[in-house]
Image (tube, rainbow, N blue to C red):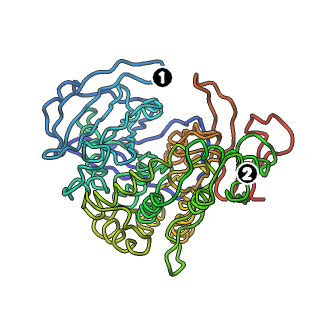
């Protein structure tokens, strides 16, 4: 079925979304996208649309409440087409937005999420995936210009933009610019983000479902309340040094590496890993009893006094990189958003005392988290959600993502088939770690939405500094993990199967 929408003499085609079961694969080849124009003639996506106005003509215009400051042409490269780069700021705010409009457009719109406290535009086009798909690519700074989050203090309007409303403002501006530039709106729209951008992806589906056909949420948190508790209580623990934390991780690998059928430096069967830093770390590492207990605490579910779990413990990845960020993120959220009090002393923190206060502000006042019902309704409408998370993530717990996603799957019922949760073995926060961390999920998401293609098991790769592939692994759907078959090239994904045993 198709619905056509007249727009001032133009025609916009919007195929209906079908509830098609999906699983991702890397590098899937897209079939020609069949679209029908308002007059009924065929109009394939490979017949790229050209701009109808000059790039520089957009400068100075106010579009959807955003003032365009610059619009410049960027030359083509070997991997992406030439494009028009548009930068603007929402009127009366510090909300900066960037739009990249390819010379040859295939009616696709891709909005990119940021990270941390945002405060800057994360460079779009870093992987060239969206532009290589001839999609309009859009990103924003989360509504403010301070990456520390300190400018949230006494400014609830900035907090609200950061919480989620900047997503909608960016989408409306990006699509309005697209219409001005090409003479029509996108036919398909996607949101892709990791970390805070993963939270944004889930909020895009929950709160602004009319704007997006599919979202890709990497290392998200749908549980910012519990996450703030986890980060802030970590400031009261006796944490080991960075070198000791690396040694703790090495001890975990030594104990659990072979549980996936091969010793390759990656703990793929993380669920079977029974690791205790107080017992399994060599004495030569020099952990004190307090340090071992601190690491164990962070790897254990965080609970209230009534024994209810509010955050699932971290996996077995090294905390050396992200441990120093726990304080800035936890205390930053507490001082600048939750309490709006820069002088608050984190020494006064306790999990039970502050839980309701954090919840009332994060969930109640600003609605930071994507709701179970909203995500379920998105899936029931036939739209798609891909969630992925690294099992070595030491900043956001992949186990908490799995735990909280279960409620969405149950609420969605049979429509849960429109979602996938993938755990990337051995991958740290949004990348890094010993596992295969190069994962293009946008390309298969496009194939899923536009063609109904079910490409099977994803394949991720590990690349060296020059970009050469070192090894590949299947990206398994939770709760499965990549298990070595017992023979074959250990560096090839074909030698592994997704297993739950």
Quickly name the residue at label 1: 79
| Label whose residue precedes the other's in the sequence (1 or 2) | 1
**Which secondary structure lies at badge 2?**
strand
- Residue 168, position in %: x, y? 29, 52
Q: Nearer the viewer, mark 1 or mark 2?
A: 2
Residue 402 vs 130, above or below: the answer is below
Instruction: Decide if residue 244 is on the left or right side of residue 500.
Output: left
- Which of 227 and 89 lies nearest the eye of the viewer? 227
Circle 2 is placed at which residue position? 498
User: Quick one: which residue is furthest to the right in this view?
Assistant: 487
* Residue 308 in the image, given as x and y percentages of width and height: 52, 77
Verify CB contact (< 8 Å) between mark 1 and mark 2.
no
- Furthest residue toward bottom: 306
- Residue drawn at x 48%, y 31% is 127
Between 46 and 373, the residue placed more toward the observer is 373
Task: Give the residue displayed 44% in from the left and 31% down from the top.
Answer: 126
Spot occupied by residue 445 in the image (x, y as percentages of width and height): 52, 45
Secondary structure type for disc 1: loop
Image position, residue 408 (x, y; %): 51, 67
Q: Quadrant of residue 461?
A: top right
Res. 66 image quadrant: top left
Asked whether the viewer can see residue 415, the reply is: no
Tell me the residue at 34%/54% (across/down): 332
From the viewer's perspective, tell me whether residue 45 is left or right of residue 158. Answer: right
Q: Where, quadrant-wise, is the C terminus in this rendering?
A: bottom right
């Amino acid at each position: 079925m198709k619905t056509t929408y007249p727009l001032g003499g133009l025609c916009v085609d919007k195929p209906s979304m079908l509830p098609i079961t999906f699983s991702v694969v890397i590098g899937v080849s897209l079939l020609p996208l069949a679209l029908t124009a308002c007059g009924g003639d065929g109009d394939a996506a490979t017949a790229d649309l050209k701009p109808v106005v000059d790039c520089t003509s957009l400068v100075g215009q106010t579009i959807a409440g955003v003032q365009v400051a610059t619009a410049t042409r960027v030359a083509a490269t070997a991997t992406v087409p030439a494009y028009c780069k548009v930068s603007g700021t929402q009127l009366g705010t510090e909300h900066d937005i960037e739009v990249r409009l390819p010379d040859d457009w295939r009616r696709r719109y891709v909005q990119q999420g940021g990270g941390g406290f945002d405060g800057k535009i994360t460079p779009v086009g870093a992987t060239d995936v969206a532009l290589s798909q001839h999609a309009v690519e859009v990103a924003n700074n989360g509504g403010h210009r301070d990456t520390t989050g300190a400018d949230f203090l006494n400014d609830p309007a900035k907090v609200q933009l950061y919480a989620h409303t900047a997503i909608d403002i960016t989408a409306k501006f990006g699509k309005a610019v697209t219409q001005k530039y090409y003479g029509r709106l996108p036919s398909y729209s996607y949101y892709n983000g990791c970390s805070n951008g993963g939270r944004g992806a889930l909020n895009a589906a929950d709160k602004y479902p009319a704007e997006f056909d599919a979202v890709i949420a990497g290392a998200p948190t749908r549980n910012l309340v519990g996450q703030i508790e986890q980060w802030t209580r970590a400031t009261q623990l006796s944490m080991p040094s960075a070198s000791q934390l690396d040694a703790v991780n090495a001890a975990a690998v030594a104990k659990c590496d072979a549980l996936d059928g091969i010793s390759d430096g990656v703990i793929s069967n993380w669920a079977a890993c029974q690791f205790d830093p107080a017992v399994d770390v060599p004495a030569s590492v020099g952990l004190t009893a307090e340090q071992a207990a601190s690491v164990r605490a962070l790897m254990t579910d965080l609970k209230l006094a009534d024994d209810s779990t509010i955050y699932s413990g971290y996996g077995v990845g090294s905390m050396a990189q992200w441990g120093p960020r726990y304080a800035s993120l936890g205390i930053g959220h507490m001082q600048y958003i939750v309490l709006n009090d820069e002088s608050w002393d984190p020494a006064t923190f306790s999990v039970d005392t502050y839980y309701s206060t954090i919840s009332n502000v994060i969930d109640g006042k600003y609605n930071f988290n994507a709701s179970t019902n909203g995500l379920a309704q998105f899936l029931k409408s036939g739209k798609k959600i891909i969630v992925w998370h690294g099992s070595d993530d030491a900043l956001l717990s992949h186990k908490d993502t799995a735990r909280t996603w279960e409620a969405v799957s149950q609420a969605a019922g049979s429509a849960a088939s429109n979602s996938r949760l993938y755990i990337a073995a051995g991958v740290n926060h949004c990348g890094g770690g010993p596992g295969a961390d190069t994962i293009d999920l946008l390309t298969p998401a496009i194939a899923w939405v536009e063609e109904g293609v079910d490409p099977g098991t994803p394949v991720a790769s590990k690349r060296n500094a020059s970009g050469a592939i070192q090894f590949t692994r299947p990206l398994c759907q939770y709760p499965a993990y990549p298990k070595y078959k017992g023979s074959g090239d250990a560096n090839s994904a074909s030698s592994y199967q997704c297993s739950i045993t």
